[in-house]
Image (cartoon, grey):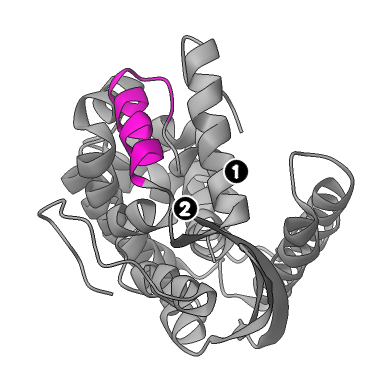
């Protein structure tokens, strides 16, 4: 579990940031809405570049849905948008492992046993194929997600084949960075996430996300630069439905994807984000705990 935690931290930070593909706000005040579909995508991307998950969540859903999600968070019935991440059901355990008093020693011992100087190319290739097959054939994905996400996975897999993940010095620095961030976040159990609530919980996890992107940059994956370079253009609009084209580079691989947006009460929202959020509210009302993604 411990070494899987270290490996998952590296990949989760990358996948989390781009699967959701400025200005930190700590007062909880609503931000001026984006006026066009393309501006909406740029705004959401800017929040991710700024490591501001709270602002992202506020911009991604209508205020009534956000209020329902906040209530469900405090009752321990959802952790949206975190429960859309890979390994989401293991997030509290991963945070607990990273924030344990002896985390640096135990994680480094696990690294020495399983990853030091290892050739991870075959494993990365296998996981890439497996994950792409799952996204295209199974799971609860929209048409645009099934087109977009496999490209992300393939780009990340290509990067992982040659990334220096087996380097001891990088591993030691990465572990130090992530353990410090996890301890500051202080979210090592389901109860801790519920007690924090969505606003405070996402603000704390934003610092963990920032630490994860710093770690990835040390391994040659600069998500800040990749996201800042994204080109966003309106492709089409018919009434309250629009399609926006995103072009950017991930780990040296060009990505070209189209997302659908819909207008509600005069504001634009990415349809996939909205669907997942409303599903989270609905599932939270039917279940007594956080459902696995």
Q: Is residue 65 magenta?
A: yes
Residue nearest the viewer, comparing 72 with 263: 263
Q: Residue at x 40, y 38 (%)?
A: 65
Residue identified by numbered label 1: 275
> Taking 285 as reference, is 210 above or below it?
below
Mark 2 or 1, closer to the camera: 1
Q: Residues within 10 Å of mark 2 (few under 14, many from 20)?
A: many
Is the residue 250 above or below the residue 13 in the image? below
The numbered disc on residue 9 is: 2
Please tell me which residue lies in front, 169 or 160. Answer: 160
First-in-chain label (2 vs 1): 2
Q: Which residues are magenta?
A: 63-78
Report crowding for label 1: few under 14, some 14 to 19, many 20 or more residues within 10 A (C-alpha). Answer: some
Question: Taking the image as drawn, is residue 86 in sight?
Answer: no
Rendered location of residue 72, percent (x, y): 36, 24
Of residues 111 and 182, the one nearer the viewer is 182
């Amino acid at each position: 579990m411990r070494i899987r935690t270290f490996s998952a931290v590296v990949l989760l930070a990358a996948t989390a940031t781009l699967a959701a593909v400025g200005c930190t706000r700590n007062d909880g005040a609503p931000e001026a809405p984006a006026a066009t579909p393309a501006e909406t995508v740029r705004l959401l991307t800017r929040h991710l570049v700024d490591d501001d998950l709270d602002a992202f969540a506020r911009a991604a859903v209508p205020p009534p849905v956000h209020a329902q999600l906040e209530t469900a968070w405090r009752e321990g019935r959802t952790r949206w948008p975190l429960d859309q991440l890979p390994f989401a059901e293991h997030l509290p355990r991963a945070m607990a492992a990273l924030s344990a008093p002896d985390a640096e020693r135990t994680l480094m011992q696990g690294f020495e046993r399983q990853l030091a100087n290892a050739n991870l190319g075959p494993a990365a290739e296998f996981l890439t194929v497996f994950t792409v097959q799952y996204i295209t054939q199974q799971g609860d994905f929209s048409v645009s997600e099934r087109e977009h996400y496999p490209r992300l996975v393939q780009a990340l897999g290509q990067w992982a084949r040659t990334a220096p993940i087996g380097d001891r010095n990088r591993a030691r620095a990465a572990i130090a960075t992530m353990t410090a961030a996890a301890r500051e976040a202080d979210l090592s159990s389901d109860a801790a996430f519920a007690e924090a609530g969505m606003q405070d919980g996402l603000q704390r996890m934003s610092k963990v996300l920032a630490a994860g992107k710093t770690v990835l940059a040390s391994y040659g994956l600069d998500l800040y630069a990749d996201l800042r370079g994204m080109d966003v253009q309106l492709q089409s609009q018919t009434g309250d439905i629009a399609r926006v084209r995103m072009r950017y580079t991930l780990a040296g691989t060009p990505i070209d994807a189209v997302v659908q947006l819909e207008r509600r009460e005069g504001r634009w929202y990415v349809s996939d984000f909205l669907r997942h959020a409303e599903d989270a509210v609905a599932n939270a009302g039917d279940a007594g705990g956080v459902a696995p993604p």
